[in-house]
Image (cartoon, rainbow, N blue to C red):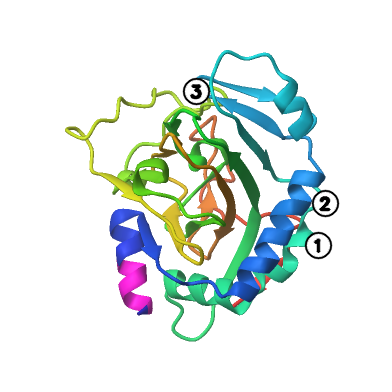
Amino acid sequence: MAVTLRAKFLEDGCLKIPGALSEDCLNRAEAAWCWSMENPGPASARLLTDDILRVSGEDAARALDVAESGFFYQDIGHPEALPVYQDVILHPDIVAILKAVLDADISTEAWFLGEQIFLKEANSPSTGWHQDRSDISAAGDDMIVLWISFDEVPEAGGLEVVAGSHAGTTYSSIYGVYRSEDIPLVTENTHDVRRFDSQRGDVVVFHMGTLHGGGATQDFARRTLALRFVGPDCYFQSRATDDDPRNGSPYRPGGLKVLPI
């Protein structure tokens, strides 16, 4: 199983593992998600189709006067989140996924990069195409996102990933022009778009370099948690310059817990 998942991850940059999480793991993850909702961090925001509005929490996000339908909220990288999420990232179900995707013959290591939570309510528009790699100074094969939904998500409203895009260009970020190339227009005719439905317990795994987004929610809402990890094949790559002396050195998130697997 490990070789198959590793090979698929390297080739497509995305895959789904049905029923990967037990109720115990899901309950721990959902409790952590709730903590993040109740304790907003400095990066909490309301997400719009063409904008990201920083807010001080869910209530402030709902109070915004915006024309866009629905409600889409996120929080990411809370500075006090690690102790809360530790039981999740060390859970045997999560470790088993990492071990399979990293394809460790005997042992290896993964480093927890951070958490991101989403609340996307009914009638919210699609999430624009973007790459997580655009916003960090890193590259390599071992850049892993575990996408976990606590609610049933139909294919039309779930995660969307351009297969194989992790092996190509790193485009400018939606947060700012860190790179030099604009995100391309993604269509069914020009790109290999994979869409993932999700049942409770499923995990979608994707590479931080893939172009990805999210379908519009019509008559349903979803609560989602993304956990990001890097493995041994992840190295520093400056967002701003190609001649940074740190380029090519191992990328290890400072101050975050090392996860041996």
User: Residue 55: x percent and y percent?
Assistant: 75, 27
Q: Nearer the viewer, residue 186 or 254?
A: 186
The label shown at residue 80 is: 2
Q: Place residue 137 in its image quadrant.
A: top right
Indicate yes or no whether the magenta region holds residue 93. Answer: no
Which residue position holds label 3? 49
Helix, strand or loop: magenta stretch: helix
Q: Kindly identify which residue carries mark 1.
A: 83
Query: Local crowd at mark 2 within 10 Å, few (<14), some, or many (≥20)?
Result: few
Question: Amino acid type of disc 2?
Answer: Glu
Measure the alpha-carbon separation of dots 2 and 1: 7 Å
Report the quarter where the N terminus lies.
Answer: bottom left
- The residue lying furthest to the left in this view is 189
Identify which residue, 7 or 59, lies in the foreground.
59
Where is the C terminus found, in terms of image quarters?
Answer: bottom right
Label 1 residue SS: helix
Q: Which residues are magenta?
A: 2-7
At label 3, counting other C-alpha atoms closer than 10 Å, the crowd grade (few under 14, some 14-19, many 20 or more) is: few
Circles 3, 1 touching at the beta carbon (< 8 Å) = no
